[in-house]
């Protein structure tokens, strides 16, 4: 998977025979066993593993739901109720899938903001990072189409609002929308194709995840100091150190996940989605799922249809330019006293936008959304480029080891072997 | 005595074959994609189901808004009161986002009947009747306001509620989906 030479030597005769024909054991060994991991990683670096777990969980629960679900406008709502009431453990599988989507986004937002904080997007990880943005866009498309499938009121009107975004495109907008619908309005053909694509996209996500991990294994992981691994003493082998830590984090995350599934299974959904779709009545207050709210607030902040759509799409696409908009040579915000304050301000603005997205579009909510939208873009277009020139970063440690163990003076006061090179063991 | 260097710049038969093969593959690829894209468009059954529909106006009382469907799209039929018609006509054109006189939005001699598409021109929600500043419609989704002529007066909607094609078969019957031919 990378240029890291593998030391893997198959032991059995069959292993040798197989490895010379398909060197997959060596690939796994070099990528997930011997792979050097910075020794100072925090639990924020376990969210990649948590996300892989969530993707697998969503695919497995989704495949089972597809066995009982009927993608037809007349039958879909009933088939979901059939899953909830009749199918053995159907309620559990559906709640795992529905809440799993939210958990997936909880994990991905932590993963994204960890990347923002520690400057993981900067050279040499730009391609790795942009692949991540692509995964996020695919996740949004998948989640949106999944929410349409129960064919409740929020499903129907969410689909109407989101597909109508494309009608803002000049000249060809209306044609594109009728091709999305397969009719003159959201209807049975729309539901059918959304089901097909909802099943397809997770496997496309899985494909991009493989590229994402591949691109990660070329430069290796970033770490809280932002400085690269300079010697073997800065790193520990992936197995057992990262493996065990990732498994522990996944288990803790499963507890969090289970709490929602068993105690608050409908808290993150909307009650209106238990009313069958009715094209003659709009719910009093259309709100998307919580993970779309900040982008929804940006859409509504612009008092112009095309402008709002462009602003909403730009809010994500602007992420792709971060490696070049951020002019600071220092990766980790831990060494950027000024940027640290702007980072947390940006986090606050994103959360505020999310809350504003859940409010009705009236009065001061609109004005607040507009102020937050302006700041959101200013963060990328003004704060990131300018701070790199005006900020005086704190001195960086000489190595990852030094940041963990303090400056080396003959190893006094350190447990024996603490600064030994773990690679050389065994 | 000019010397010619034939093998340097001169296109060869092989170059031609590369370009011809590439062009054939591109045309073939586009031809193959075409039916897949077209399959996404509304199919013949959907188009056939979109034939004109007749609506009897007799049971619609003054002040009432009735919802009907044509081609899966919601249509409002509003029996306007005299005040509502007056409010729609007495409007300063310059103040409108999408200027249109009320007379252009109703059929001549039938000013009491307003027939408009029932989905907000912003993102397609159903606006609520007799609400908002102008007592026309108010969209609860993103706050667009429409007057008693279905014209946008505020909020993010870019244009007025569009008028579907329709004609009066008699004073009490309209055919939605068919413009008068005469």
Image (spheres, coloured by chain):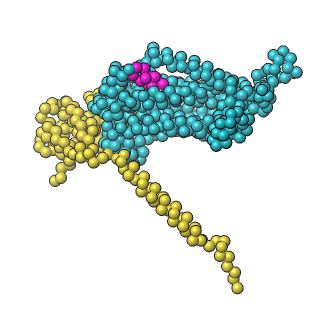
Chain colours: A cyan, B yellow
Residue A51: where, in percent of width, then height? 56, 28
Taking A270 as reference, is A3 left or right? right
Quarter of the image for residue B134 reads: top left
Taking B18 as reference, is B68 left or right? left
Residue B95: where, in percent of width, then height? 35, 39
**Rendered position, A256 above or below A9:** above
Q: Which segment is the magenta one? A: A89-100
Residue sitting at x 49%, y 59%: B25
Nearer-the-camera pick, A56 or B174: A56
Residue sitting at x 39%, y 49%: B36
Residue A256: where, in percent of width, then height? 53, 17
Taking B76 as reference, is A392 left or right? right
Residue sitting at x 66%, y 40%: A17
Nearer-the-camera pick, A44 or B143: A44
Q: Quadrant of the C terminus of chain A?
A: top right
Quarter of the image for residue A394 reads: top right
**Rendered position, B24 above or below A187:** below
Nearer-the-camera pick, A255 or A393: A255
**Rendered position, B45 above or below B29:** above
């Amino acid at each position: 998977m990378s240029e890291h030479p593998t030391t893997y030597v198959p032991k059995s005769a069959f292993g040798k025979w197989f490895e010379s024909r398909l060197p997959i054991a060596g690939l796994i060994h070099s990528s997930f066993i011997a792979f050097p991991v910075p020794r100072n990683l925090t639990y924020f670096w376990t969210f990649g593993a948590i996300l892989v777990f969530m993707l697998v969980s969503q695919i497995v629960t989704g495949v089972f739901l597809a066995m009982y679900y009927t993608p037809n406008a007349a039958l879909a709502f009933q088939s979901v109720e059939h899953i909830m009431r009749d199918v053995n453990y159907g309620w559990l599988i559906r709640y795992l899938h529905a809440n799993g989507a939210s958990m997936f986004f909880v994990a991905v937002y932590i993963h994204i903001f960890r990347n923002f904080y520690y400057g993981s997007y900067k050279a040499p990880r730009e391609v790795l990072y942009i692949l991540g943005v692509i995964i996020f866009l695919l996740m949004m498309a998948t989640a949106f189409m999944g929410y349409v499938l129960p064919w409740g009121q929020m499903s129907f009107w969410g689909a109407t609002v989101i597909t109508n975004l494309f009608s803002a495109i000049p000249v060809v907008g209306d044609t594109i929308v009728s091709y999305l619908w397969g009719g003159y309005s959201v209807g049975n053909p729309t539901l059918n194709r959304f089901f097909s694509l909802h099943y397809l996209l997770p496997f496309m996500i899985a494909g991009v995840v493989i590229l994402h991990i591949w691109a990660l294994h070329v430069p290796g992981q970033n770490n809280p100091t932002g400085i690269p691994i300079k010697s073997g003493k800065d790193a520990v082998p992936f197995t057992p150190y990262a493996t065990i830590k990732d498994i522990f984090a996944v288990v803790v995350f499963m507890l969090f996940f289970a709490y929602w599934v068993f105690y608050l299974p409908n808290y993150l959904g909307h009650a209106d989605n238990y009313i069958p779709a009715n094209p003659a009545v709009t719910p009093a207050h259309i709100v998307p799922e919580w993970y779309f709210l900040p982008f929804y607030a940006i859409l509504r902040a612009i008092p112009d249809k095309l402008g709002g759509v462009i602003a909403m799409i730009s809010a994500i696409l602007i992420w792709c330019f971060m490696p070049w908009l951020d002019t600071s040579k220092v990766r980790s915000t831990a060494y950027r006293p000024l940027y640290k304050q702007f980072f947390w301000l940006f986090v606050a603005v994103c959360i505020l936008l999310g809350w504003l997205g859940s409010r009705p579009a009236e009065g001061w909510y609109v004005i607040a959304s507009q102020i937050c939208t302006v700041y959101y873009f200013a963060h990328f277009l003004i704060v990131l480029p300018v701070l790199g020139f005006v900020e005086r970063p704190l001195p960086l440690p000489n190595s990852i080891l030094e940041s963990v163990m303090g400056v080396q003076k003959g190893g006094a006061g350190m447990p024996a072997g603490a600064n030994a090179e773990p690679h050389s063991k065994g | 005595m000019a010397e010619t260097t034939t093998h340097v710049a001169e296109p060869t038969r092989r170059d031609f074959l590369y370009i011809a093969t590439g062009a054939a593959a591109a045309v073939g690829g586009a031809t193959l994609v075409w039916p897949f894209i077209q399959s996404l468009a509304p199919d013949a059954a959907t188009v056939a189901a979109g034939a004109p529909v007749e609506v009897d106006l007799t049971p619609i009382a003054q002040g009432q808004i009735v919802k009907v469907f044509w081609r899966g799209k919601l249509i409002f039929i509003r029996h306007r009161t005299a005040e509502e018609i007056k409010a729609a006509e007495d409007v300063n054109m310059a103040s409108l986002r999408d200027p249109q006189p009320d007379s252009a939005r109703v059929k001549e001699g039938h000013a009491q009947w307003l027939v408009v598409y029932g989905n907000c021109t912003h993102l397609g929600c159903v606006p609520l009747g007799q609400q908002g500043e102008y007592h026309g419609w108010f969209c609860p989704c993103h706050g667009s306001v429409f007057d008693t002529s279905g014209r946008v007066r505020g909020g993010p909607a870019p244009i007025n509620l569009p008028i579907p094609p329709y004609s009066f078969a008699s004073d009490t019957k309209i055919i939605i989906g068919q413009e008068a031919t005469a």
